Image: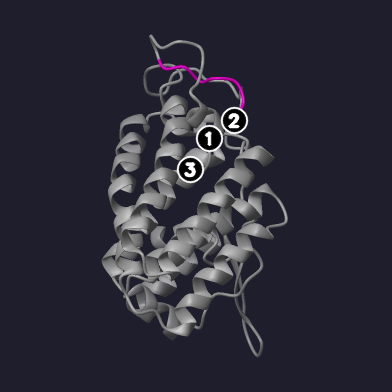
């Protein structure tokens, strides 16, 4: 159930969309149809999907995308070590995935997949939709590797990243900077330049980590009192013992 719930949270199946037919979805997830039915029943009980029977029926995503800032830092209580580790893991996995993708001879459909995902980020209606479109782009890049294990690894780090980014509001300047980095990554992959693709994704990951490590170190320990203070790109989020001024990279705070 958690895998399907993660796919919904990340926008693989956006709000209002209908899940693929049971047989197709079971194959895609590598589970039996009985297991899939149990997962969907759990999601239905949680209010994440709704199912209608009969001709033209199906299972529809009923969970609207979360808006950055609405989660609040308290939602991350007790997860500091886990989430810090996910940033380290991401710094290895996503740049490597981009290098692998750039080294493959991509079919036209694969190129369209990633350029379409990039366009969806650029045209997202609002912060909530942008957050999910951002995740879908990263998952599309992982898909270009042709490696199910790399896709699973990128999905895992994107799930943790999503939880952190939902905890803080995002500013237009952050989205613009992030979009420029996304475009550079996609260009490098489509140009077949693996080293450039790795380097561009490393920069993207480093900018994200600079902000989010400050978020996780806000009070210096797990689960402590936190407020809903400055969002990405606003006032500094100093770690214990640090100064009160952010570096330029930290202030950009992009995804």
Q: Secondary structure at mark 2?
A: loop
Q: Residue 220: x, y in percent?
A: 38, 17
Relative horizontal placement of residue 39, taking residue 64 as reference (left or right)? left
Residue pictured at 58% horizontal, 59% vertical: 133
Residue 23 circle label: none
Label 3 belongs to which residue? 163
Label 1 belongs to which residue? 253
Q: Secondary structure at mark 3?
A: helix
Label 2 belongs to which residue? 233
- Mark 1 or 3: in front is 1
Residue neighbourhood size for the residue with mark 2, other residues' Cα within 10 Å, grouped as few (<14), some (14–19), many (≥20): many
- Residue 35: image quadrant is bottom left
- Residue 63: image quadrant is bottom right
Q: Rounded to the nearest whole Å, what is the CA distance between mark 1 and mark 3?
A: 15 Å
Residue pictured at 56% horizontal, 66% vertical: 117
**Is residue 4 among what the camera can see?**
no
Which of the two discs, 1 and 2, labels the residue nearer the N terminus?
2
Residue pictured at 51% horizontal, 62% vertical: 136
Is most of the magenta stretch helix, strand or loop? loop
Q: Looking at the image, is 225 positioned above or below residue 170?
A: above
Q: Secondary structure at mark 1?
A: loop
Q: Residue 54: x, y in percent?
A: 63, 87
Which of the two discs, 1 and 3, labels the residue nearer the N terminus?
3
Relative horizontal placement of residue 175, taking residue 138 as reference (left or right)? right
Q: Quadrant of the N terminus?
A: bottom left
Which of the two discs, 3 and 2, labels the residue nearer the N terminus?
3
Q: Which residues are magenta?
A: 234-239
């Amino acid at each position: 159930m958690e895998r399907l719930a993660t796919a919904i949270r990340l926008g693989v199946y956006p709000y209002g969309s209908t899940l693929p037919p049971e047989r197709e979805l079971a194959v895609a997830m590598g589970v039996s149809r009985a297991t899939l039915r149990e997962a969907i029943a759990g999601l239905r009980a949680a209010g994440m999907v709704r199912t209608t029977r009969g001709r033209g029926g199906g299972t529809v995503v009923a969970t609207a995308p979360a808006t950055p800032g609405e989660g609040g830092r308290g939602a991350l209580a007790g997860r500091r070590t886990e989430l810090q580790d996910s940033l380290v893991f991401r710094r290895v996995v996503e740049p490597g995935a981009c290098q692998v993708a750039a080294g493959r001879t991509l079919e036209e459909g694969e190129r369209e997949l990633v350029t379409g995902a990039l366009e969806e980020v650029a045209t997202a209606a609002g912060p909530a939709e942008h957050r999910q479109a951002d995740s879908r782009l990263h998952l599309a890049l992982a898909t270009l590797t042709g490696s199910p294990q790399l896709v699973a690894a990128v999905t895992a780090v994107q799930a943790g990243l999503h939880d952190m980014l939902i905890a803080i509001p995002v500013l237009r300047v952050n989205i613009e900077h992030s979009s420029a980095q996304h475009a550079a990554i996609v260009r490098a992959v489509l140009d077949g330049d693996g080293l450039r693709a790795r380097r561009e994704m490393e920069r993207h990951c480093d900018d994200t980590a600079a902000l989010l490590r400050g978020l996780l170190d806000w009070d210096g320990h797990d689960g402590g009192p936190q407020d809903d203070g400055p969002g990405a790109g606003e006032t500094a989020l100093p770690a214990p013992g640090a100064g009160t001024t952010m570096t330029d990279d930290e202030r950009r705070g992009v995804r």
